[in-house]
Amino acid sequence: MFEYTKALLREKRPNPFYRHITKLSLIQSRNYAETDHLLPEEQWAQLTFKFEVKASEDDAQDSNKIIQYNVFERRLADKLSYMDWKLSYIIDTEDF
């Protein structure tokens, strides 16, 4: 997903998540388990992204930049699709 969004930025194609992304950063990635048994059904993967978004495409000022953190999760046992990440949290800078 990270590579897909970065490719859209490089090619200046529209993004399905946001209209005017100016920068995307991978902040954290981790795997964790619910118990001591490392069964795939009990393991989770998590990605945290930092999105810098302009309020509008014509907006040239940095003061109108919006910073948002999105956390995506999936179980390691999910075999539906590689892109089957679920948005679990949306966090603004003010939430910290």
Image: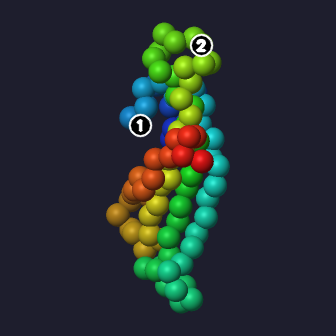
Q: Position of residue 40 (x, y in %)?
A: 48, 79
Residue at disc 1, secondary structure: loop
Residue at disc 2, secondary structure: loop
Q: Image quadrant of residue 51?
A: top right
* Residue position for label 1: 17
Q: With 27 as the anchor, is 83 left or right in this view?
A: left
Residue shown at 43% from the left, 32% from the top: 18
Q: What's the mark number on residue 61? A: 2
Neighbor class of circle 1 (other Cα within 10 Å; few <14, some 14-19, many 20+) is: few
Q: Position of residue 75 (x, y in %)?
A: 44, 69
Tell me if I can see residue 9 in this picture. no
What amino acid type should be assigned to the residue bearing mark 2? Gln
Rendered view: 23 above or below 63: below
- Looking at the image, the residue that sits furthest to the left is 80
What amino acid type should be assigned to the residue bearing mark 1? Phe
- Looking at the image, the residue that sits furthest to the bottom is 37
